[in-house]
Image: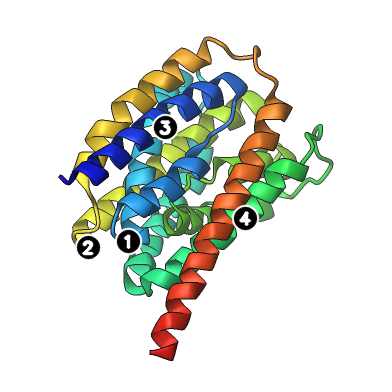
Amino acid sequence: MAMNDALLLGAITIVSFVLAFYGAAAGLILGHLRLPLLGYYLPSAASASATNLAISGLGALTGTIRHARAGRISLRVLALMGIPSVAGAVLGAWVMLKVDADWARIFVGGFLMVSGINLVYSHPEEGGTVLFNRGLRMALEILIGLALGFLAVVTGLMMGSMRLPMMIKWLRIDPRVAVGSNMAVGCLTAFAGVISFWSQGKEFHLTPLLIIAPPTILGGWLGAKWTGKIRKESLALLVGWMVAGSGLVMVGEGLWRSAAKWLG
């Protein structure tokens, strides 16, 4: 490993630990910020997505076990959303390996921009009033699982921040059960995506996972003890602008490379 690569990997590891600590303390998942860093260390957007998902999945595994022991995971939700999410992850991995790397970078960067701006301007809302009949609710759960599973692998993010509000506001799932079930579905989706990447080619890189994952898990465990001591709104604002900025850089770089290829 070249010295520059080693220094970059060390910097990503430190940043990931800090993000996990503060993210766990404020109840946020900060894989958005780890993803662009991995994108510059690894050779392709698919590599960054797979590695980021693996780290996030490992971080979510301990939480999933804890929620399961406390009875906060619904087997019904896990079946109706988890299985389609796994199918979407497999499809997303196949698509990610087939598309041009620069266009993939543009897509991921654009998603990060939207996600970051949403963090900056979103405001917490209480409950929802929309109810669905049983059949439509089941169809909606399956559709949400499939769509977010696909997006999770294509973007390299677990999509929990999108899935959780849908569970609570649209599907009227008890918030405590929604939190546990959301983490379990995200964990399953992450591992399904990683396995799909690994089985389809050499896009999965084990070294950064082995180096980055343990400090990240430790940071999340330590940060959880500080929950409530950091203002969630302030952290969301800071993270939002950083995510949007990193997304803008990725889009610009992808467009620049695509234009250079086109101009020949």
Q: Which residue is mark 3?
A: 16
User: Gap between marks 2 and 3, in whole Å?
Assistant: 27 Å
Q: Nearer the viewer, residue 197 or 23?
A: 23
The amino acid sitting under disc 4 is Met
Residue drawn at x 48%, y 44% is 158
The colour scheme is rainbow
Q: Is residue 26 left or right of residue 68?
A: right
- Can residue 143 be spotted in the picture? no
- Distance CA(mark 4)–CA(mark 3): 20 Å
Quadrant containing the N terminus is top left
Q: Which mark is residue 44?
A: 1
Which x, y percent locates residue 37?
A: 41, 46
Label located before the other in sequence (1 or 3)? 3
What's under tag 3, amino acid-wise? Ser
Depth check, mark 2 against mark 3: the one in front is 3
* Pointer 1 local density, CA inside 10 Å: few below 14, some 14–19, many at least 20: some
Q: Is 36 left or right of 136, judged from the image as shown?
A: left
Q: Residues within 10 Å of mark 2 (few under 14, many from 20)?
A: few
> What x and y, as percent, mark residue 258?
45, 78
* Viewer-nearest of discs 2 and 4: 4
Instruction: Give amino acid for label 1.
Output: Ser
Q: Which residue is mark 4?
A: 113
N-term-proximal mark, 1 vs 4: 1
How far is the residue under mark 1 from the one under mark 4? Answer: 19 Å
Quick check: 194 left or right of 181?
left
Where disc 1 sits, the SS reads loop
Tag nearer the camera, 2 or 1: 1
For the view shown, which residue lies furthest in the right direction? 129
Q: Sequence-wise, which precedes: disc 2 or disc 3?
A: 3
What is the number of the mark on residue 200? 2
N-terminal-most mark, 2 or 4: 4
